[in-house]
Amino acid sequence: MIEQANATGGFSVVVTAVDAQGFLRACLDSALNGSPGVGAVEVVVVDNGSTDLTGAILDEYVERDERVRAVRLPHRRPAGAARAVGALLTGGAYLLFIEGHDTLAPDALTVLARRAEETGNPDVIAFDHADVAWNQRITAGKDERLLCTPDRAAFALADRPRTLHLTPTLANRALRADFYAAHRELFGQDACTEVLPALGSLLAAERIAVTDAVLLTRTRHEPPPVADTYFNLFPQYEEVWRLLASGPPRTEEARIVFSGMVRRYLKVLALPGTPAAEQAAFLRRAGAHFARYKPAGYQRPAGLNGVRHALLERGSYAGYRASQVANRRRRDVRTLAATAKRKGAEAAREGLYREQLHRPLDEHLAVFSAYWDRGVLCSPAAISARLGELAPSIRQVWVVRREHMPLVPPGTDCVAPGSRRWASVLARAKYLVNNVNYPDSVVKRPGQIHLQTHHGTPLKRMGVDQAPFPATSRGVDYEALLQRCARWDYSVSANRHSTEVWTRAYPVPFTSLDYGYPRNDLYYTAGAEDVLRVRERLGIAPGRKALLYAPTHRDYESAWTPRLDLRRLAGALGEEFLLLVRGHYFYDRGPSPLTELHREGRIVDVSRYDSVEELGLASDALITDYSSVMFDFANLDRPIVLHVDDWETYAVTRGVYFDLPREAPGAVASSQDAIERLFEDGSWNGAEAALRRAAFRRRFCEFDDGHAAERVVRHVFLGQPGVPPITPLDRRTPAPDPERAAALVHSSPPEDPCPGLPPTSPSS
């Protein structure tokens, strides 16, 4: 055990969390689970006015780990104020201040404890860190050259003033608790950036120790500060200069601080979009600081940077603007040819669309699409139907490929992608709804609302989380992906797992609607007559058990060949069962491996049946592998069998969020023989499978209760602040299974037809 600095000992990790639902678990686990032998570790989390599931995740950790304490601020406060609140609850010898999007290295606290012991408990222990960009690209060792030294003793800043060049954040240093308490005034001003806490902690410290170990990973997530917060830099730097002037002359430190101050001020002035009046006011104050704090012996740098220094020193806004205009003209000339070439290919369609962008928005127009314009499907279809009931004044237009138009429900208003009317409705609609993204060319206009419904709960890695897996990420333009996602105003979620994943996988600002997947409403609103009607439509004989086999797509396979021998499986199951086989929609072109089996009557090929939700209603059980259909089907509380013969390959190649075989919703088989044994001995529908299904439903059917579409319509389209609350899982009644449905229909008068079931029919 490493000896601690005082009687209390140990470390206090203060975590400030703002809408960190996708990252907070990893952050807390990194602080709690690593670093053996460092004495007491406590984690104080300040929920700084979060509006997502951060508070719920925090509740879980507080309940299960006594080392975690929570503070909830009703409204968001500056980071320094939030940190100060958390620090009041700490009792450790050293304090670390990190954010809910950060993670500590597994040995971080061990390394810091060892350095504290080796150097006699200095005021500050600085360490290196890594930054993770939105595309998962890691930049490590940013401060290595400043921290790598053969002399491992603590030092005074005057002996190594270059330490002031460290990345200006409190997250890359541990502060001795009594040092922090003696200098609290340094840590509260950081509304724009952490200039004062970072520089002030080094200037006030008597003894500093460093390590070049990378002990922290920071995920950059927040948008840049708004323009007016940049004025907070001025009082921060004024306090820094007060510290510099409070003791003996610190010539080299002053030179470094001045250089950094000027560089930061010029960076602010170069930011696009700042109103001219605010830019002029900032320049005047920055110029005053330049003149006031310019150190003796200052020499203006050469070249364009020297010109900028001169303009800043004079405080001349007119001169600065003239310089900006001249530079912009030079850049425009260089890019003119490239711009013209890029615009040539799509000029006609783009011109038509751009022309429509000048027309006013139609406040009563909503555009829908699903699965890259394949038809009226999935959650967009469920929202569309409910919108027609609750807000009939909003006109609806669906984007559908021409070859799919004959299959849409009668009366649907459709436009073909790329058509003249397509350009008009996309440019002018108030609402755009999709379960994927609209094309890159679609512009997010002020006042438009983009609603992203997604099309399944994620098992496989999504968005930027795919980046480390070359089999799926090769050739993916993640910048373009995030530009598309940045149009989202709302993201629909069926469970907290999905909410956390969408936040992390698509690191752009949006509001999560934790309302359930609208496409799954049918599983709670359909009655016995609806179940039997779909079965009749599919030709399933009364009393015969229908097994829906719905495998997923594999990125490492160029074409689909069922991994089960369906002819053999149908024979092994016998006449009691009927196999409904649905291939993934990625394989909807070209010859199907199911054609011959369907023709022979061995199976029913339902790959072209539009509604997978209706297929679920008609089925007694589901057989799948890694398809998200399992999460939806679980709402029906019917047996699910997983065939996971290539799980290791899939998990390593595609990337997954959890160990599916361990958390499966039912019986698991790794071979065809094992599948057949499950149905032979009845364990496909046994007690153990039911227990696993119940646990799975608690986690993944969290928000699905039959009212998701209504909640979305009331929130997004009607602007109603209150939506129907989520019905607890134990109080929900899913649609009856086929056997129960038959018993209900035969023992009671016929039910009224359900208006929610359209008169579709399989085209197979």
Image: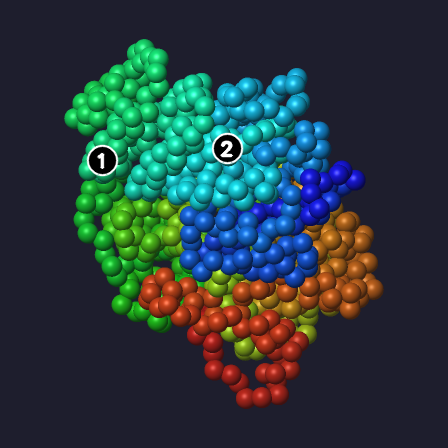
Task: Tell us which disc is closer to us: 1 or 2.
Answer: 2
Secondary structure at badge 1 equals helix
Residue at image point 54% right, 66% down: 704
Question: Is 709 left or right of 526, judged from the image as shown?
Answer: left
Looking at the image, is 304 positioned above or below residue 163?
A: above
Residue at image point 29% right, 19% down: 309
Q: Position of residue 687 (x, y in %)?
A: 78, 68
Specify whether residue 126 is in view.
no
Which of these two is toward me, 32 or 314? 314
Question: What numbered label is drawn on residue 360?
Answer: none
Residue at image point 78% right, 65% down: 688
Instruction: Pick the quarter of the image with the N terminus.
Output: top right
Which of these two is toward me, 510 or 744? 510
Which of these two is toward me, 684 or 618? 684
Question: What numbered label is drawn on residue 281?
Answer: 1
Q: Position of residue 134 (x, y in %)?
A: 49, 37
Instruction: Pick the quarter of the image with the C terminus.
Output: bottom right
Q: Position of residue 41 (x, y in %)?
A: 68, 47
